[in-house]
Amino acid sequence: MQSTMLKAKLHQARVTHAVLEYEGSCAIDGKLLDMAGIHEYEQIQIYNIDNGERFTTYAIRGEEGTGIISVNGAAAHKANVGDRVIICAYAGYSQAEMINFKPRLIYMTEDNNVSHASNAIPVQVA
């Protein structure tokens, strides 16, 4: 049996571009893709913290070191420059693979630099 698990997350990245007249996808700084383990053309989910939109697209490699997060094509209607987004990739894992499985969680600053990385989401008590 396969279970679909969170593979990687870029948490609170800021949208730097929203380009409607584009073929589609989301351009992400290549260094951020590498750090998160997200591959070019891999399906991603984007959750817009500021307006609640949730949508699916695919990652394309943006220029390294630029901090670019460019939401392109029809998805540009769902995010504005400056919006905070969570970008997630999911993958299927067997029961054996899940024994040592840990996602890559990358936490971002306001200017799309990495504040820290983790492999576990902290539990918050209300």
Image (tube, grey):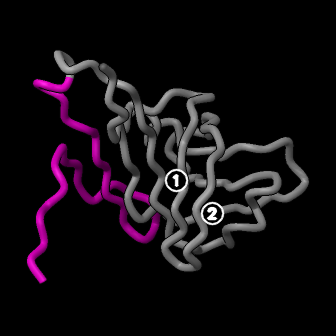
Amino acid type, callout 1: Gly
- Label 2 belongs to which residue? 16
Q: Rate crowding at label 1 as few (under 14), some (14 to 19) or many (20 or more) other CA atoms within 10 Å.
A: many
In percent of width and height, residue 9 lies at 37, 48
Task: Give the main secondary structure, helix, strand or loop, of the magenta stretch.
Answer: loop
Instruction: Describe residue 1's horizontal placement relative to residue 102 as left or right.
Output: right
The C terminus: image quadrant: bottom left
Amino acid type, callout 2: Thr
Mark 1–mark 2 contact, CB under 8 Å?
A: yes
Estimate the spatial distance between the alpha carbons at disc 1 and disc 2, rounded to whole Å: 8 Å
In percent of width and height, residue 112 lies at 45, 60
- Label 1 belongs to which residue? 67
Instruction: Describe residue 78's horizontal placement relative to residue 23 as left or right.
Output: left
In percent of width and height, residue 79 lies at 67, 68
Which residue is the extreme one toward the front? Answer: 1
Please tell me which residue is depicted at 53% across the width and 79% down the height of the picture: 50
Instruction: Describe residue 68's horizontal placement relative to residue 65 as left or right.
Output: right
* Residue nearer the viewer, 56 or 118: 56
Q: Which secondary structure lies at badge 1?
A: loop
Q: Rate crowding at label 2 as few (under 14), some (14 to 19) or many (20 or more) other CA atoms within 10 Å.
A: many
Q: State the extent of the magenta-drawn residues as a range.
A: 98-126
For marks 1 and 2, the one nearer the N-term is 2
Q: How many marks?
A: 2
* Residue 35 showing in the rendered view: no
Q: Which secondary structure lies at badge 2?
A: loop
Please tell me which residue is depicted at 81% across the width and 52% down the height of the picture: 73
Query: Is 103 part of what is drawn in magenta?
Result: yes
Query: Is 36 part of what is drawn in magenta?
Result: no
> Where is 98 relative to 50, above or below?
above
Which residue is the extreme one toward the right? Answer: 21
Please tell me which residue is depicted at 46% across the width and 66% down the height of the picture: 111
